[in-house]
Amino acid sequence: MKGKFLVIEGLEGSGKTTIQKVIKNILLNLGIKKIILNREPGNTIVGEKIRYLIKKKMQKKFLKIQSYYYFMRHVFNYFIK
């Protein structure tokens, strides 16, 4: 079977991480062992720093932070191809 890409989107605090864990457990119980979890921005040192800035300092310099977010999305898409 070819790999599948599942996207979970939602507002801050809507339960994305919780549902991600539930889905992972369901897949593991079905015998699917190779599961890669990702979050945007995240999973890299730069991505985690951007995530911190977005979550903790969103009030300050919003446009600059948003630019970093789109940059990391571009980088992620480059490596996915």
Image: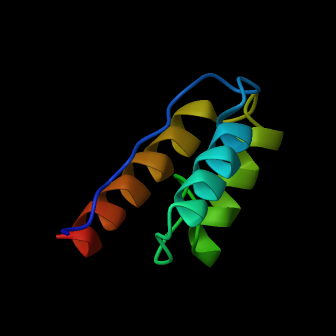
**As rendered, which of 72 and 62 lies closer to the eye?**
72
Quadrant of the image occupied by residue 18: top right
Point 68% across, 45% down: residue: 22
Colour mapping used in the image: rainbow
Q: Quadrant of the N terminus?
A: bottom left
The x, y position of residue 16, in whole percent, is: 65, 36
Check the image and report above or below for 74 versus 45.
above
The x, y position of residue 6, in whole percent, is: 38, 47
Point 60% across, 56% down: residue: 24
Check the image and report above or below for 14 versus 18.
above
Which residue sits furthest right? Answer: 56
Point 33% across, 66% down: residue: 75
Quadrant of the image occupied by residue 41: bottom right
Relative horizontal placement of residue 27, taking residue 4 as reference (left or right): right
**As rendered, which of 72 and 6 lies closer to the eye?**
6
Point 51% across, 61% down: residue: 30
The x, y position of residue 65, in whole percent, is: 57, 44
Quadrant of the image occupied by residue 80: bottom left
Relative horizontal placement of residue 12, taking residue 26 as reference (left or right): right
Relative horizontal placement of residue 67, taking residue 5 as reference (left or right): right
**As rendered, which of 57 and 9 lies closer to the eye?**
9
Q: Quadrant of the C terminus?
A: bottom left
Check the image and report above or below for 66 versus 35.
above
